[in-house]
Amino acid sequence: MEQSASEKRMQSRTDLVEDLMGRFPHVPREAVIKEDLLRGGLAFDESALTDNENGDVKPKSYFIFSFDHRTLPELGEAALRRPPEEIVLLGGPYDLRRTVVSVRTNPDSPYRVKAGEDGQLKLFLDGRPIADVGLPPMPDYYRHTLANGKQVMEVAPTIQWGYLVYLTVYRVCQYFGASEECQYCDINHNFRQHKAAGRPYTGVKPVEEVLEALEIIDKYDTAKASQAYTLTGGSVTRKVDGLAEADFYGRYAQAIEERFPGRWIGKVVAQALPRADVQRFHDYGVRIYHPNFEVWDKRLFELYCPGKERYVGREEWHRRILESAEVFGPRNVIPNFVAGVEMAEPFGFRTVDEAIESTTEGLQYFMSRGILPRFTTWCPEPTTPLGRTNPQGAPLEYHIRLLEAYRATMEANGLSSPPGYGPAGAGRAVFSVSSFMDSLPAED
């Protein structure tokens, strides 16, 4: 991957970050720091790690992917005492507004969380404190277990500072092996590494266990901080529990909506399915549909998503996304893409200009039809093909310019921030795995 011009000039990560803040002043500086943390990870002093489920800090749940730059055996103490699920940044020399960041552990990162001279946790960059760090408190509902002893954190973890209940009800993917797995995705390895470590990590979560965990959340989440749930997991190309994908995931939504009508916004992440299956999702009670298109470029989709290309195909995938808008309404169809894989070696774009041009073409394709994609900042996990060949991820300049292009395309098409993601705006956003919500205008 060719470095951006900025990265070639810069002598330190601080220089790079401050250069981009200066060159893109209309992109919130909070987003510059957040994107850098998401693409490259951060390290933790042992004193900043959690006491797992027995402590006062909400630990990282590994809710679907590892989102780490090392495997569990390589994380040392951080594999035994988990880092927090997320951190919140505030203040410091950049006067950061409150910024929620998903934790992606990298022992070699120039960013480190440790106590400052005053004893309070701070984020250090190149050895210099740049922000105060807040840790997510252990929610009351995590302190209770199901009747069978399982933890709520294992069955129904919450992310985005408690806004979203993340229900990975199928922990593996039926796109399996080098000829089918998405080349940036470690869902199958993440399942294997947690099982090997002896952690509870249920392959298929029984419906009744999910309902029991949600009852605990509903009872103890008295502030109603949790406002949405996402049903997700690996792709189903055959069947699970005798059910094809729409009915397998849909049965959870149906049970949740019958037991807790209107308590949460129901979302599902699944493949781009035929219209009849999409209609069943809606009939089951799902209100937001995420048929992720992963990467826009045709050649890269075929290379990076070989299973999806083989079973569905890029053109059919896109046709189904557009068709699903007729069922859910365009605003409620929100396909994700993995921001940064466009520049992954050896097949990706060589320059930031080319990558942004391609991705913006995809944004315009969907946004001109009223569909507002969102994105996750690519974490190059080390057990994936693209992670092994691109341990540094994509250039930070790409991520900053993507935020600029995303907002410009959205506004040019008269769209506003999507539903089911909490508040927009720097200092307000809770969406933690990219900065797209931090970079959008705040709305009442």
Image: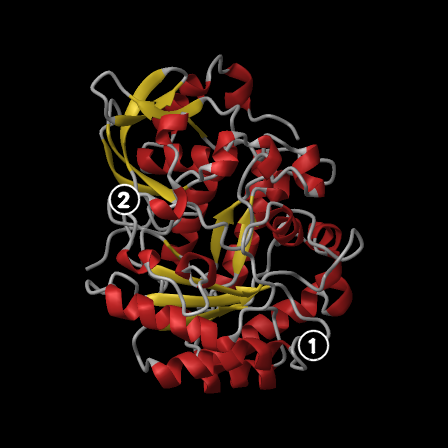
Q: Residue furthest right?
A: 179
Which circle's residue, 1 or 2, is located before the other in the chain? 1
Q: Quadrant of residue 234?
A: bottom right
Residue 106, x across and y down, in percent? 52, 30
Q: CA distance from mark 1 to mark 2?
A: 42 Å
Task: Tell me the quadrant of the picture where the C terminus can be found.
Answer: bottom left
The answer to whether residue 438 of the structure is visible from this angle is: yes
Q: Residue at x 38, y 82 (%)?
A: 257
* Up/down of 296 relative to 236, above or below: above
Image mark for residue 239: 1
The answer to whether residue 348 of the structure is visible from this angle is: no
Q: Residue at x 62, y 72 (%)?
A: 319
Q: Quadrant of residue 94?
A: top left
Q: Secondary structure at mark 1?
A: loop
Tag 1: amino acid:
Lys
Q: Nearer the viewer, residue 97 or 231?
A: 231
Residue 177, x across and y down, in percent? 78, 54
Q: Secondary structure at mark 2?
A: loop
Q: Are marks 1 and 2 in contact (CB under 8 Å)?
A: no
Residue 158, x across and y down, in percent? 38, 57
Q: Is residue 244 left or right of residue 95?
A: right
Residue under numbered circle 2:
426
